[in-house]
Amino acid sequence: MKLVVLSGAGLSSPSGMPIYDEIKLDSDYLLLHSAQAEDIVIGAISSLKSRFLHIKPNSVHRELVKLHHYCQAHGVEMTHYTLNVDDLIEQVGGTVHHLHGNIKDPKSIFDHKDVASLDLNSITWASGDLMVVLGVSNNGYPLSYLESEVLACGGSFLNFNIVNNDDLLSQTTVGDLSDTFSVLELSQNLHSEFNIIDLGDYEIDIKTFSINERTYEVYFTPTQFVVTSEEEQKELEELVGQKLDHTAYEIKFDLQSNRESESPFEQPDNNFTLRELNLLGMIIASTIKAHSSLRQVTLYTASAAEDNLVLFYNRLANVYASRLQYDHWCGFGLEGVNYAFKKQ
């Protein structure tokens, strides 16, 4: 599948960039769109640029970079097109195709201020593809035809904006993008199927992803089949206040190569960077969210295979448990490496 993102003024407005209604009568803006001489247009661009140099990227720009890394980990082709000419997404390490030029190259704005560098209607869609529109009004781009093309090919269309778009068949998620858009939620539209292994008495659900050319697997096993003793089971049930039934699952993740070589939880040769750790945490959280919907899970359990993973697990629980709507217990058991997450 592929993911295509189209962003507009609503992406950068939380940073302080003006939307169309706020700038449409500005003298430099009017000159930019009315003048035909290149030097006059570039002069207007330079004037506008100097007035907005203080503006910084916002959380949505950073979330889009996370989304790109998430897609890379799952083999999803992601392309981001923007109607904006600012370089805020590039400032946080993102990649984007500017349809009407980039402020860092004023000539590109002159060349494409009237005619976009790409006709989005030329995109070839396939079943399972996803288009996400962020902060684009009908003034910025006529979305209804684009939506019809995506839906006709069996794709999905998601629209995020501060106001509803009555011209669209798809529902608009209304609100400030910084409140409504997140990789954790969007990832549920990108998940591939779990690999389900039938072991007779129970099934194991497996999700695969790659980070830095290393392939990982997240395993979900019914907890009642992995507890080592009645005493351990009783302690866990008393702690969380429920029995270990078919809605309780144990979470583990490991390198695929470790499973294939029968050397479980052997650490990779190179340590994770901070960015890779954050990506790993986000992927595990999004996988839990998808699995929770698949199996209607009420309780997850986990344990750190190595002591040096305890801090990572603690942070993962503290950052994501409430967002996943689970209460959590960290670091219990004799060795202080056990975890539990109970549906709220």
Image (cartoon, helix red, strand yellow):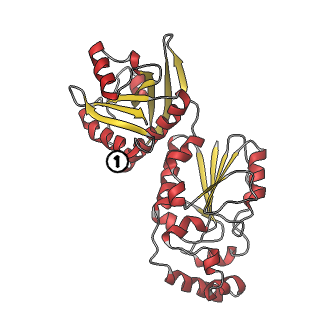
- Judge whether 175 appears above or below 128 on screen: below
Q: Position of residue 142 (x, y in %)?
A: 75, 63
Q: Position of residue 45 (x, y in %)?
A: 59, 82
Q: Nearer the viewer, residue 242 or 111?
A: 242
Q: Residue furthest left?
A: 334
- In the rendered image, which quarter is residue 136 located in? bottom right
Q: Seen in the image, is 267 located left or right of residue 286?
A: left
- Which residue does the numbered mark 1 point to in the structure image? 273
Where, by quadrant of the figure, is residue 313 drawn? top left
Residue at 44% in and 38% down: 284
Please, what is the three-letter code of the amino acid marked with disc 1? Answer: Thr
Q: Is residue 80 above or below residue 152?
A: below
Q: Quadrant of the C terminus?
A: top left
Measuring 27% from the left and 37% from the top, which residue is drawn there? Answer: 310
Left-right relation of 89 to 257: right
Residue 270 visible within the image: no
Q: From the viewer's perspective, is residue 193 above or below residue 70?
A: above
Would residue 322 appear left or right of 290 to someone viewing this image? left
Of residues 149 and 248, the one drawn nearer to the viewer in this rendering: 248
User: Where residue 231 sits in the image (x, y, percent)?
Assistant: 26, 15
